[in-house]
Structure formats: structure tokens, C-alpha cells
Amino acid sequence: MNYATIKTCDIANGPGVRTSLFVSGCTHHCKNCFNQEAWDFAYGEPFTDQTIQHILSECTPSYIAGLTLLGGEPMEPANQQGILPLLTAFRARFPEKNIWCYSGYTYEQLTAPGSRCYQPGVTEQLLSLIDVLVDGPFVQEKYDISLRFRGSSNQRLIDLRKTEAAGEIVWWEDGPVYSTRRM
């Protein structure tokens, strides 16, 4: 897996100050995507153990509320195995911080065995580590600059912990920037 960039002190992709990883590779190719160069799976730098350690180091300050995954497409089958060690290490080291993931795949696609993006044993693990999933492709015709943390009105901000507990999709409600995870 490759990554396009790492942004520290990011305030645009989730609540609070965050560290954001933009992975490389995306097959959605949304019209007017803000990050078209990251469609190429070979774009950027190799994602290594040193990259994981760098990201964890950048997340250490108390003012960092969490980690955000974007792309490219973090939930591409080719990327899921690569980000799993990062999320596992992040969750172990920072149980009080949250993880957001932006995906052009919907929650329903990500949880449906047999779908293109579903990777048995891996996708479930990733979703269990993520607090908020911003799902659905960017749709230019539904672009709305007034939306918080998303580009088009079809995209949902799903609170995965509350969704798991309720057995139905529960939208994220703006509130404290700490993790929704039980400690």
C-alpha cells in the first residue's frame, strides 16, 4: 500500500485537531474529486512500519483529538490490510482518541459478505476500530458547501459504536471530540 500524504494539525476532516492519512488508490473516480492524484495505487510513498510510527508520534500530543483516514480510498480491498496495523496500534495507544474514516463505499457495502469491498475477517476488524464512518461517494450534483465534514448530501456520518449497539444506522451527532468508545 502507498499513501499520498499525512496532514498534521488537520481541522477539516473530523472534530478537533487531527492527524489525517490520505492513502493512495481509489476505483470510485468521483466526478470533481478533490484528490484525483490519489486514485493511482502507486502514487506517493510506501506505507511502512516507520510510517505507522510517524503517525502515532504525530497523534501523541493531548491537543490531537484523533486520526482520520481518507484517500484515495482507505476501504479499497488492496488498502484494508495495510491500514489494519495502524488502527490496531492507534487504538491500543490512544483509547481516549477517536478514529474517523472517509469511504466512497457505503456502510451496507462494507458489511455485505460478497461485496467488492468486503474482506472476510479484515473489514469487520477495521469497522470495529473506527468510531465514525463518513460513507458514500462524493456526488457533484449533491455538493453542498454548508455540510459539516462531508462534501455531498448523500454522504452519511455514521457513529459505528451506536450503530452496533442499536442494530441500525445511527448518525454521528456533533459533540465532544473524544472517542465514543467505552474505556
Image: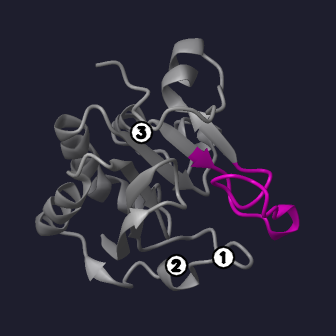
The one nearer the camera, 90 or 59, is 59
Residue at x 65%, y 26% (from the top left corner): 170
Mark earlier in primary sequence (3, 1)? 1
Residue at x 42%, y 69% (from the top left corner): 22
The residues tagged by marks 2 and 3 sit, at their Cα atoms, a distance apart of 23 Å
Residue wearing tag 2: 39
Residue at x 69%, y 43% (from the top left corner): 156
Which colouring convention does the figure follow? one colour
**Marks 2 & 1, CB-CB < 8 Å contact:** yes
- Which disc is residue 130 wearing? 3
Q: Which label sits in the foreground, 2 or 1?
A: 1
Residue 50 image offset from top left, x and y in percent: 12, 67
Residue wearing tag 1: 33
Q: Which label sits in the foreground, 2 or 3?
A: 3
Q: Does the magenta segment cover residue 66?
A: no
Mark earlier in primary sequence (2, 3)? 2
Judge left or right: residue 107 versus residue 83.
right
Report the predominant secondary structure element of the magenta stretch: loop
> Tag 2: residue type?
Trp
The one nearer the camera, 93 or 1, is 93
Residue 167 image offset from top left, x and y in percent: 60, 16
Quadrant in which residue 51 is drawn: bottom left
| Magenta region | 134-155
Residue 36 image offset from top left, x and y in percent: 58, 82
Extreme residue toward the right, this view: 141
Judge left or right: residue 18 versus residue 148.
left
Q: Does the magenta segment cover residue 148?
A: yes
